[in-house]
Image (cartoon, helix red, strand yellow):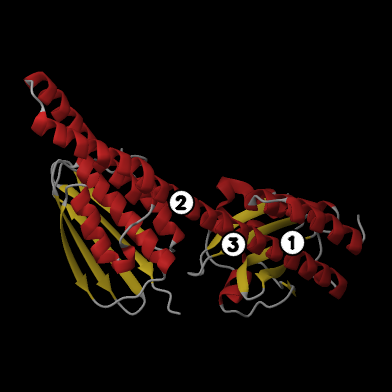
Amino acid sequence: MKSKLELLRMIAEYLNEETDRNRMLNHALKLLVENSEFDTGWIFFINNKGEHDLAAHYNLPVGLKENNFEKMFDGKCWCVNQYNRSNLKKATNIIACSRLERVFRENSDKNEGITHHATVPLISSEESFGILNVATKNIKEYNKDTLDLLESVAFQIGSALKRIELTKIEKENARIQERQRLARDLHDSINQTIFSINIMSNAGVRIAKSDEMKSTLEKIESTSKYAMNEMKALIWQLKPIGLENGLVDALKEYSELIGIELNIDIDGFYYLPDKSEIEVFRVIQEALNNTSKHSNVTMSDVEIFVTEDLFSVMVKDKGTGFDVSTVKRQNGLTNIKERIEKLGGVLNVHSKLNEGTTIRFTIPIKRE
């Protein structure tokens, strides 16, 4: 067993190098348990709805691992409840754990001597991520030194989580800037070149002396016009041009570009942060692309409903539709789902063959 300083140094050195969140949590937990008096540990991530998820675990008793960790997800417990009530501020002894109690009642051998645990919140500055729980066989209460160690490790992990989160944001911002740079380059160079080809071929058609030459130039003109429209659509994919004039104008301009007649209805006034507005635009853009490519119709309806704290959107077409149960990773649905989850929202997709498709999503509005 390592001394407190040795253990903290070991964990700090590892956390400073790791960039993958899941790998970081599991290995940091392993280092803590293997080099201290603890026999097991687990980490719950808790979202803003108070729902917990098992983010990491190490050497859990068999009773907590059964049925794919069923007891770790089933119901609430004291530590999660205290966290959700903002009452968990420091490392705390848990008098009794409802999850461990259920294991003991079913089969006392399956808790492997683990009946109580200590818990500590994972916090960085003002941001909370979840809780770290640790336990030792046949121990019901931990002394102050042990709880102090637990708080120090939790602070290290919380700081690492924040660092990884900020790094991810920086990478995303860099990716967005690169997309915007590429969009500008495409617009300023290739798009202008194609436009010039279109103009010259159009002029050539008017002065061509032979039918064969005229036919060739007409093909060049039509092909360059098609390529120009495709390039504009690609630039839109890279950078949502027109959003500075508002979401509605941007959607109308994009739908016109891809040949969709768009009906938009808005109920309520709204303000979305720039990043949220871009994500909402991307979701609706993806839905309109699906209509354009797969529905065999040229019309789509968009309804936006805004309340004090929710922004709801419905995108609907009356096209060919599809079987949702068999089309899970096609038609951009995966991208839509990921964007809505990133915004903390809820997505519902309803589609039926020959009856059309309806995509609904709701995201929270975060007021400044």
Question: In terms of sequence position, does the residue under pointer 3 or pointer 1 come before the other?
Answer: 3
Q: Quadrant of the C terminus?
A: bottom left
Q: Where does the image place residue 367, in percent across and percent down from the top left?
A: 43, 78
Q: Residue 313 in the image: state x and y as whole percent.
A: 27, 63
Circle 3 residue: 45
At 77% across and 70% down in the image, what residue appears?
Answer: 151
Q: Is residue 65 above or below residue 101?
A: above
- Do labels 2 and 3 touch, CB within 8 Å? no
Q: Which residue is mark 2?
A: 181
Identify the amino acid type marked 3: Phe
Please provide percent x and percent y for residue 36.
85, 57
Q: Which mark is residue 134?
A: 1
Q: Is residue 270 left or right of residue 175?
A: left
Which amino acid type corresponds to the residue marked 2 in the rendered image? Arg
216 or 240: nearer the viewer: 216
Left or right of residue 343: residue 226: left
Separation of disc 3 and disc 1 at Cα?
A: 15 Å
